[in-house]
Image (tube, grey):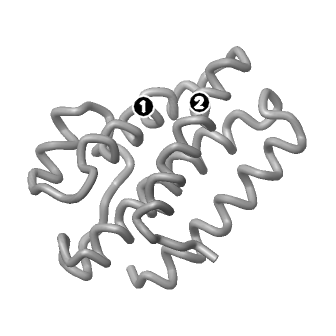
Amino acid sequence: MRVEDHLRNIQESLEVINESIQKGIQERQRNIGFNCSVASVEMLEIFLHKNNLINPGAVIKHDWFASERKANEKLPFDFPEKDKIMKIPIEIESKRSLLCYGKPHEIETIESVISSFNQIKSLFESLELKWN
């Protein structure tokens, strides 16, 4: 996928996350779970493409972050801030299915996903990635 397509998708996810926060996170937990997961993976993919660490046609999937072992198998190479970066999508993915397919969850669970997403977003911004 082209970087421009990733950027458009990230922008859409950011809008949905913000709308979900405004409408009430407990009422929009599915939107938050899905969009925090997909946007964090798209950000990572842009970062890896821009640093020529993966082939232009390579695609990263959210389920690669179902476990630390699987994530490291799929992305075995080193890159700047790898330990910090890899930890966050794993945290988000651990709660994604609960929020997307499960019963309503406590506000703290939903807030923790939003917090993790904001951490990875800030981390990528500090590495000079921009989405708008």
The residue depicted at 73 percent of the width and 20 percent of the height is 107
Q: Would you identify the image quadrant in which residue 34 lies?
A: top right
Q: Would you identify the image quadrant in which residue 124 lies?
A: bottom left
The residue depicted at 52 percent of the width and 37 percent of the height is 116
Q: On the picture, is 32 further left or further right than 122?
A: right
Return the residue at label 1: 91
User: Quarter of the image containing the N terminus?
Assistant: bottom left
Question: Vertical placement of 104 versus 20: above or below?
Answer: above
The residue depicted at 24 percent of the width and 72 percent of the height is 58
Return the residue at label 2: 101
Q: On the picture, is 129 further left or further right than 35?
A: left
Residue 24 or residue 82, whichever sits in front: 82
Q: Amino acid at mark 2?
A: Tyr
Q: Amino acid at mark 1?
A: Glu
Q: Secondary structure at mark 1?
A: helix
**Residues at badges 2 and 1 in contact (C-beta under 8 Å)?**
no
